[in-house]
Image (cartoon, coloured by chain):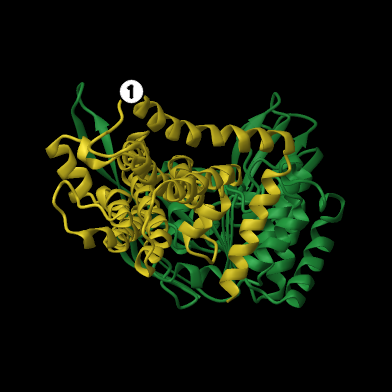
């Protein structure tokens, strides 16, 4: 109970800190939305050139983009700033976080909570809403459940990827932007029907690393379409399991990373 | 309160050896430290740069995982029980702030009350005490980024004490401070130590901190404890003596000796002489000197701890 009050206090402090600089805060809020808008525009432009991509129409593809970008925007909002970890590790400022009576990860997330990214979340959810409206989905209780569950599972999944790639910094301070290949690269991967990818690449990312279950398989289940790649319909419900698996791995790696932390001389 | 048994911390460093090759080398930052610190003790932990002071402190606070050996603070094992331990200790790392950069000091303190989950009443009492002793009132509503280093350090000390810790770890609390701020910090810590319920471990390069505050001095070098005891014990061990400095009207006659002392220096064309007091008291030496030559001025100089410690560092 007390811990939640502590977290709330940290969150409020962050909001108060960023709003100290009012003008720059507003610029950032709107500047940040741009990025997400472009992701969706890319897909729309692609469909200007061809009516079908990987066997999917524009409407269907937008549902995949919507699921992926709603989940990603939420994860990026809640967890994305964990990539600042490498600066903390390099400068040794993680020390100050580790001597407080709260677990390090939630503290870091709240201390850096990117309020400026709120509009991105709104935009991601709007895209999802539009996509749902644009498709003629035959609603069943199971599908209603799925439309709520999928973005949440995607959030957990992307959040885990963020934490995993940030944890690299514990072992390898100069990890630079390698992590971004998996976070932003992963988001781009999940924005398209996976049938467009070459087979070994798809096997690796979609099935082995689990990105195919984030948006593509659930979209098929929502639309009631058979998977052109042959997975059964229930594969659309695997996303929470995949997300849970990713979260478990991320938590383990994070914990190992904290123990490996070397700090710096002072 | 604090127990360390054969505590070690190794770091692997990669050394460039050719264009692509890197050689791994293991460096022991802390190399088998065993210490026990009782409740209420004030311990000065000193050593040259890179001796392992901060590394030890980071292992005691749960920031770093020891490579081997055992450590317990307040009966807890720092790394696995880090968050529980954090509620019972206070930490000031001179170079790492616990305060919120963009918020007024007052709000940082209020936030810490929630972070440490302490009852409002106890928090308010401790804050009042710190405000009085450290003169915080004039900058309590200033954002932390606008504070001077001395003001910020006073804020950091307060922040570390608001939850009523049993042990206070201070890593170079006076580094970079001006004389007045150093004094303020020292008197505050001395006041804190007088009550006897806070155990204090402090690392520093400023030996005046230790002389003012700490009964017990632990000197570490190359990751090992080279001295553990009082400042007097250190002087005794290294044979540091008081000395008598005298300004004379005329240089000493050739072959002059003063019983029980050694003439260690003659400067200012023979007008200033220094005798080290080996086996006589200052009074006897002064009387002997005054009886023999015309003395214009004299003073008795206490042994300088800086010299002793410098000798300790170079003697490897």
In the rendering, at what x and y percent does residue B30 appear? 36, 54
Q: Is residue B59 left or right of residue A30?
A: left
Residue A247 sits in which quadrant? bottom left
Relative vertical location of residue A163 with respect to residue B272 in this rendering, above or below: below
Question: Which residue is at a point 24% across and 41% down the rendered structure image?
Answer: A194
- Chain letter tied to green: B
Q: Is residue B194 above or below residue B171?
A: below
Q: Residues within 10 Å of mark 1 (few under 14, many from 20)?
A: few
Tell which of A174 and B167 is nearer to you.
A174
Choose between A51 and A117: the one closer to the eye.
Answer: A51
- Does residue A207 appear to the left or right of A136 in the view shown? left
Give the chain coloured yellow: A
Taking the image as shown, residue B285 lies to the left or right of residue B217, namely right
Considering every residue shown, the one lying at the far right of the view is: B138
Quadrant holding the C terminus of chain B: top left
Pinpoint residue A170: horizontal percent, then vertical percent. Answer: 35, 47
**Residue at 50 percent of width and 34 percent of height:** A37
Disc 1, SS:
helix
The one nearer the camera, B285 or A193, is: A193
Camera sees residue A78: yes
Say if residue B311 shows up in the picture: no
Residue beneath the point at 33% across and 56% down: A222
Q: Which quarter of the figure has residue A1?
A: bottom right
Q: Position of residue B126 (x, y in %)?
A: 75, 70
Residue A5 on image: x %, y %: 62, 69
Tag count in the figure? 1
Using the image, name the chain to which the residue with label 1 belongs.
Answer: A
Per the image, the residue denoted by label 1 is: A49
Query: Which residue occupies the foreground of this view, B21 or A6?
Result: A6
């Amino acid at each position: 109970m007390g811990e939640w009050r502590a977290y709330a206090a940290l969150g409020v402090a962050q909001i108060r800190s960023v709003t100290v600089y009012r003008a720059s805060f507003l610029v950032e809020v709107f500047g940040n939305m741009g990025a997400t808008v472009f992701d969706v525009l890319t897909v729309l432009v692609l469909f200007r050139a061809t009516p079908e991509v990987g066997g999917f129409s524009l409407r269907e593809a937008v549902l995949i983009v919507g699921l992926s970008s709603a989940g990603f925007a939420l994860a990026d909002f809640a967890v994305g700033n964990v990539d600042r970890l490498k600066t903390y590790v390099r400068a040794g400022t993680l020390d100050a976080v580790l001597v407080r009576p709260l677990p390090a990860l939630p503290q870091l997330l709240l201390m850096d909570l990117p309020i400026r990214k709120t509009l991105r979340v709104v935009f991601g959810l709007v895209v999802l809403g539009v996509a749902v409206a644009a498709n003629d989905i035959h609603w069943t209780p199971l599908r209603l459940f799925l439309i709520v569950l999928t973005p949440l599972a995607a959030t957990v999944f992307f959040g885990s990827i963020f934490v995993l790639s940030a944890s690299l910094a514990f072992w390898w301070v100069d990890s630079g932007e390698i992590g971004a290949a998996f976070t932003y690269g992963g988001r781009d991967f999940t924005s398209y029907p996976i049938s467009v990818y070459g087979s070994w690449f798809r096997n690796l990312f979609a099935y082995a690393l689990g990105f195919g279950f984030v948006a593509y398989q659930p979209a098929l289940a929502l639309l009631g379409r058979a998977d052109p790649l042959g997975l059964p319909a229930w594969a659309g419900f695997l996303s929470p399991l995949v997300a849970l698996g990713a979260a478990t791995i991320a938590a383990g790696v994070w914990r190992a990373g904290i123990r490996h932390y070397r700090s710096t001389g002072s | 309160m604090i127990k360390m048994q054969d505590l070690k911390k190794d770091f692997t460093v990669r050394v460039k050896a050719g264009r692509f090759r890197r050689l791994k080398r293991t460096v022991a930052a802390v190399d088998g430290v065993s210490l026990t610190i009782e409740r209420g003790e004030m311990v000065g932990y000193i050593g040259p740069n890179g001796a392992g002071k901060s590394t030890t402190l980071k292992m005691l606070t749960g920031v770093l995982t020891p490579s081997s050996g055992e450590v317990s603070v307040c009966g807890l094992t720092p790394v696995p029980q880090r968050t529980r331990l954090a509620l019972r200790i206070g930490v000031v790392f001179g170079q790492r702030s616990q305060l919120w950069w963009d918020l007024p000091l007052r709000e940082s303190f209020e936030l810490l009350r929630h972070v440490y989950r302490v009852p409002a009443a106890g928090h308010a009492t401790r804050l009042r005490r710190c405000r009085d002793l450290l003169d915080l009132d004039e900058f309590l509503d200033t954002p932390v980024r606008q504070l001077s280093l001395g003001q910020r350090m006073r804020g950091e000390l307060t922040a570390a004490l608001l939850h009523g810790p049993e042990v206070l770890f201070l890593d170079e609390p006076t580094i970079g401070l001006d004389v007045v701020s150093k004094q303020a910090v020292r008197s505050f810590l001395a006041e804190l130590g007088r009550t006897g319920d806070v155990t204090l471990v402090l690392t520093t390069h400023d030996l005046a901190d230790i002389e003012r505050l700490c009964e017990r001095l632990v000197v570490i070098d190359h990751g090992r404890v080279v001295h553990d005891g009082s400042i007097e014990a250190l002087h005794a061990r290294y044979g540091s003596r008081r000395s008598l400095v005298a300004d004379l009207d005329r240089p000493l006659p050739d072959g002059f000796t003063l019983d029980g002392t050694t003439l260690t220096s003659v400067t200012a064309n023979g007008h200033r002489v220094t005798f080290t007091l080996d086996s006589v008291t200052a009074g006897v030496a002064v009387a002997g000197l005054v009886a023999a030559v015309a003395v214009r001025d004299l003073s008795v100089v206490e042994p300088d701890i800086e010299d002793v410690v410098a000798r300790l560092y170079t003697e490897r």
